[in-house]
Image: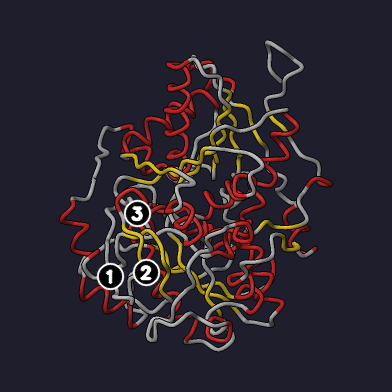
């Protein structure tokens, strides 16, 4: 409770009875629907039968669903959610005081589970549908390791084989995250690897590379399609993932109502789009229906700025060019991000729903250098007592900047951001920052031109 006013809570905890029973599908309220996925060879829209060779049947239906606003959450998934949900919505009083701002700052904390992040919300859903279909296992990629950790937990719960291709730079930087995955029974391979044909090709084209999410996706898809009884699952980018993650935004709306608040600004870090899309979707739905208005800010790393410096075009979702093409803001599937410390945001493109919303002017985007991100992470940790993941700290950086703007203008706005997870497996990165050994890398226009020149030609 607030020590200066015991009637004002620091933290709003929803009851189990308030746990949402349905996910929200923002596509149903979009006037301009996201463009369809295209077949990588024919460039024709992907059909259900084509996609079901890659994804579970029920997940394929969710991926293609542009019309149903609400989809029931199965009882088995809600039962699992109860182990760590509803997640708290926290009023950042100490951060407000340190900034001297009239703004009210809230954050939705998604780190209250062993995976340490929001990724478990979709991992358990995807594992459930795989088990329900009678599959033996799944293959996936992971960047910083949060998704791989979450999926290994979900597969252990449903007794599924879990194969993870982990971006090589993160595999080396975050060995303890890797060991959590192995503890839950997953096999973990640094990507690119020599285990797949596409991995060997990438290694030949980019010797010594630290990899990227695009590389790891290519390997995971090849591994899944080459084994009977396996399917590919993905922790971000896909529409089905945004659907599952909408539970974040749905709970946030309920929490704000309990506080008696209405958000003015909603902020999320942006890599492939899972956290950002999940947080903003229910609020965006209100905006699309004309019921309320909000500012939405996507925050991405300056080293991998797909929204702020990419182009809106069809591109491959993976570096190996074996996945469907998605119309999205992209830096080009051959773009190799620098080895920054926010592995979960090192993806060349953005989810097609968020890309369409951004193209329609319904949300904003900004990019931030990693030293500024870690300055914000340190400041937040010293104020609020939680060590944030580097990915989450991008949203913290923007929230602080917005709060300072409010201080300068005198506006008492309500700022909400997503704290996607904790940074306790990211101490190598914090060590670099504390030792003043962290550097910033911003790709030049020439760097981006090379990969953008390779975009597929779609009529």
| Residue 347 numbered tag | none
Horizontal side of 248 relative to 18 (left or right) equals left
Q: Specify whether residue 282 is in view.
A: no
Label 3: which secondary element: helix
Vertical relation: 428 (above or below) 171? above
Vertical relation: 268 (above or below) 203? above
Which mark lies nearer to you, 2 or 3? 2
**Sequence-wise first label, 3 or 1:** 3
Residue 195, horizontal then vertical, whole percent = 36, 79
Q: Are marks 1 and 2 in contact (CB under 8 Å)?
A: yes
- Judging by the rendered image, the residue that carries numbered circle 3 is 306
Tell me where residue 160 sits by quadrant.
Answer: bottom right
Q: Quadrant of the N terminus?
A: top right
Q: Residue at x 49, y 70 (%)?
A: 140
Horizontal side of 243 relative to 352 (left or right) equals right
Q: Residue at x 76, y 63 (%)?
A: 72
Residue 103, horizontal then vertical, whole percent = 54, 21
Q: Could you classify mark 3 by the number of other residues whose Cα lies within 10 Å: few (under 14), some (14-19), or many (20 or more)?
A: many
Q: Are marks 2 and 3 in contact (CB under 8 Å)?
A: no
Label 2: which secondary element: strand
């Amino acid at each position: 409770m607030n020590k200066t006013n015991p009637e004002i809570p620091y933290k709003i905890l929803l009851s189990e009875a308030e746990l949402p029973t349905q996910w929200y599908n923002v596509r149903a309220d979009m006037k301009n629907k996201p463009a369809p996925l295209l077949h990588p060879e024919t460039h024709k829209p992907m059909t259900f039968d084509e996609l079901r060779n890659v994804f579970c049947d029920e997940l394929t239906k969710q991926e293609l669903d542009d019309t149903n606003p609400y989809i029931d959450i199965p009882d088995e998934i809600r039962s699992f959610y109860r182990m760590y949900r509803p997640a708290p919505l926290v009023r950042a009083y100490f951060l407000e005081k340190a900034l001297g701002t009239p703004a009210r700052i809230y954050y939705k904390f998604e780190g209250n589970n062993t995976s340490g992040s929001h990724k478990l919300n979709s991992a358990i859903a995807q594992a459930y549908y795989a088990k329900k279909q009678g599959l033996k296992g799944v293959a996936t990629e992971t960047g910083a390791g949060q998704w791989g950790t979450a999926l290994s937990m979900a597969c252990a719960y449903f007794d599924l084989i879990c194969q993870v291709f982990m971006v090589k730079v993160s595999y080396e930087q975050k060995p303890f995250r890797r060991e959590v995955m192995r503890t839950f029974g997953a096999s973990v391979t640094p990507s690119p690897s020599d285990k797949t044909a596409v991995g060997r090709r990438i290694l030949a084209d980019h010797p010594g590379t630290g990899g990227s999410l695009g590389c790891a996706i290519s390997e995971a898809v090849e591994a899944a399609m080459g084994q009977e009884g396996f399917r590919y699952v993905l922790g971000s980018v896909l529409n089905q993932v945004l659907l599952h993650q909408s539970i974040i935004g749905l709970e946030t709306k309920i929490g704000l109502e309990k506080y008696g608040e209405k958000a003015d600004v909603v902020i999320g870090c942006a890599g492939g789009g899972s956290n950002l899309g999940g947080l903003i979707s229910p609020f965006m739905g209100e905006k699309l229906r004309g019921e309320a208005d909000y500012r939405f800010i996507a925050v991405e790393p300056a080293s991998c700025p797909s929204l702020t410096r990419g182009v809106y075009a069809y591109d491959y979702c993976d570096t190996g060019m074996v996945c469907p093409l998605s119309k999205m803001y992209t830096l080009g599937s051959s773009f190799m991000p620098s080895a920054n410390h926010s592995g979960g945001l090192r993806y060349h493109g953005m989810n097609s729903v968020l890309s369409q919303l951004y193209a329609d002017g319904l949300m904003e985007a900004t990019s931030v250098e990693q030293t500024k991100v870690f300055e914000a992470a340190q400041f937040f940790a010293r104020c609020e007592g939680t060590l944030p993941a580097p990915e989450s700290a991008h949203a913290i950086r923007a929230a602080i900047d917005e709060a300072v703007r409010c201080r300068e203008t005198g506006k008492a706005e309500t700022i909400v951001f997503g704290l996607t997870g904790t940074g306790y497996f990211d101490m190598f990165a914090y060590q670099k920052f504390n030792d003043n050994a962290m550097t910033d890398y911003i790709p030049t226009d020439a760097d981006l031109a090379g990969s953008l020149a390779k975009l597929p030609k779609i009529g």
